[in-house]
Image (tube, helix red, strand yellow):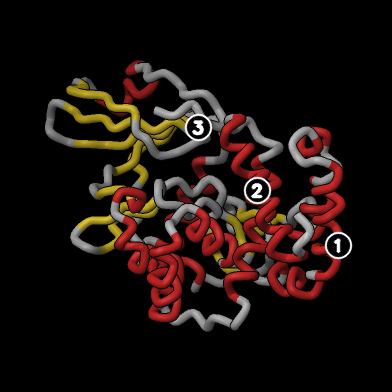
Amino acid sequence: MSDDRRYPVKPFDPALIRDFLHGRKISTVELMASGRSNTNYKLVLTDGNTYALRIYSHGDARRETYVMDLVRDLVPVPVEVPRGGSWSVFSFLEGALLQDVPEHSGAAVQALTRISSVVLASPGIIEPDARISQFAFGGAKGYILESLENPDVSVWLEPELVASVRPIVKREEGRLAELDAECRLVHGDFNPTNILIKDDAVSGVLDWEFCHSGSPYMDIGNLLRHTGAEYHPLIESGLRAGGMALPGDWRERAELVDLTSQIEFLNSTRSTVFKQQCVARVRGFIAKNDGTA
């Protein structure tokens, strides 16, 4: 298990789910590799049933369950069985992680197009009662510019990098405004450790704590970042096969939205090595967009 997490792993305590067990015994407990915020365990009970226990450090179980119910007929997602104050038990979905079978990236991205087909009332945070709360930072442009002033981000981004990002953001105001106006369902962490593949198809989309209403290019950028370039043609063909109308600058849009993730990571508790990778990605973004880095 990697130590590159936002929050520490929470230990498993059978007493936490005593009421759910109803006297049943746990045969095996396995810490699952997926997730960097919350802690997930695979539980096999002596009655033969298998479940996923999710112990929350971040997010809201009610919100996750509400959003998964929105897409249940579109993509396979776990079913919540019971819920406690800081945990939920879900049905266990079988499959290999997409990171181990990237040749199925086309199937994964078609699932992405089905998720993004859900249109919401406005951009923002999806609340468990179906309300949409506005983002506090006023969209991608506002988030980037505000974050560049954050002392925790400044530790990682040298002044010349910050100075290079600002004019790019200014130049991209129009495109950012278009992206900020979108109000489609976004998974928010659509990477190959949260996607299961079985029998050549997506068998599960997991970990919805970062879901929101916004631009699907966040999910596209996330998947591109975590997938080898040799599989990017599968992503493009999967998007088109899923019915998404791709403009000529679709990759640039995905990279622009993904810049917000790289900057956000620098203000997180992710590992030093991971943050160094984020800085390298920011440098690469600048080099591609103004040729000065």
Q: Is residue 230 left or right of residue 60?
A: left
Q: Is residue 214 or residue 102 the one in the foreground? A: 102
Task: From the viewer's side, name the closer residue of 234 and 21.
Answer: 234
Task: Name the amino acid type tagged 3.
Answer: Tyr
Real-space Cα separation, disc 1 to disc 3, in angstroms: 39 Å
Q: Amino acid at mark 1?
A: Pro
For the residues labelled 3 and 2, the Cα–Cα distance comes to: 23 Å
Q: Nearer the viewer, residue 286 or 174?
A: 286
x and y, in percent, of residue 143 in the image: 78, 53
Q: Position of residue 196 (x, y in %)?
A: 31, 52
- Mark nearest the camera among 1 and 3 is 1
Q: Residue furthest front?
A: 292
Residue type of the residue flagged with mark 2: Gln
Q: Is residue 129 visible?
A: yes
Q: Which mark is residue 262?
A: 2
Count up the numbered dots: 3
Q: Left or right? Give the position of 142 relative to 33.
A: right
- For residue 285, what is the image quadrant? bottom right
- Residue drawn at 79 percent across, 59 percent down: 292
Report the residue marked by disc 1: 167
Measured as percent of width and height from the top left, residue 42 is found at 29, 32
Element class at badge 3 = loop
